[in-house]
Image: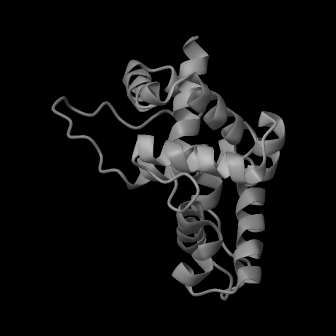
Amino acid sequence: MLAPLLTHLPRRSQDPGSQELAATLASWLAFSSHATRHLKIHRNTLAARLRLIGGLLGLDLNRLGDQAALDLALCVRAAPAPHRTEPRRGRREQGAAVPDLDAVLCGPGVQNWAAQQLRQLAPAGPAAEETLRTWLRCEAQLGPTAAELGISVPGARKRLVRLESVLHRSLLQAPSARYDLWMAFRAADLVA
């Protein structure tokens, strides 16, 4: 998924290279617009880099699902390689099929993780899940979420703040649990 980004060669020496673009993406996914402070760049520079990244990857960075997939890909890339006891059988053959995100989310380990994530919502009742699913479906935007739920924007914000206390994680402030929850709901829906 990240290959087009990680193999990117800038046209000019002053343009960001693949590692700088990967760092920009990771910072933006974690801190949203506050990535400008983290990276010490202007907001227009951040916007230009994000357009370049989206173009390289062929993804819409405004979509929460694409953001969640990229967050997962960056986490996998940053994770240390598992210790192998059996001899290596060589690298993946060129052209071999790479599993898509849905195939990964259907794996038993991921399914157990997703169930554990969603189990935390049980004490809050079915309305909590509806609120959270609606918020994620509305790209984590309060206005559309409130409209779809038929409540005010402050009402939607209050519901999400209550969910933050149930989940013991932030939803409205960066870094947010929204990518994990999007993945958990997607994984659960795939086997339902």
The type of colouring in the image is: one colour
Q: Residue farthest to the top?
A: 192
Residue 164, percent across and down? 48, 48
Residue 84, percent across and down? 21, 36
Quadrant placement of the N terminus? top right
In this view, 134 is above or below 162:
above
Side of 129 relative to 77 (left or right): right
Q: Toward the viewer: 123 or 37?
A: 123
Q: Toward the viewer: 79 or 9?
A: 79
Side of 181 relative to 44 (left or right): left
Q: Quadrant of residue 20?
A: bottom right
Side of 28 relative to 141 (left or right): left
Task: Answer yes or no: is residue 170 visible.
Answer: yes
Q: Toward the viewer: 170 or 51?
A: 170
Residue drawn at (56%, 65%) of the image: 22
Residue drawn at (59%, 74%) of the image: 35
In this view, 172 is above or below 34:
above
Residue drawn at (59%, 46%) of the image: 160
Residue drawn at (59%, 37%) of the image: 182
In this view, 41 is above or below 46:
below
Residue 148, percent across and down? 82, 36
Residue 79, percent across and down? 35, 50
Q: Quadrant of residue 99?
A: top right
Question: How many dots with numbers?
Answer: 0
Task: Answer yes or no: is residue 97 visible.
Answer: no
Quadrant placement of the C terminus? top right
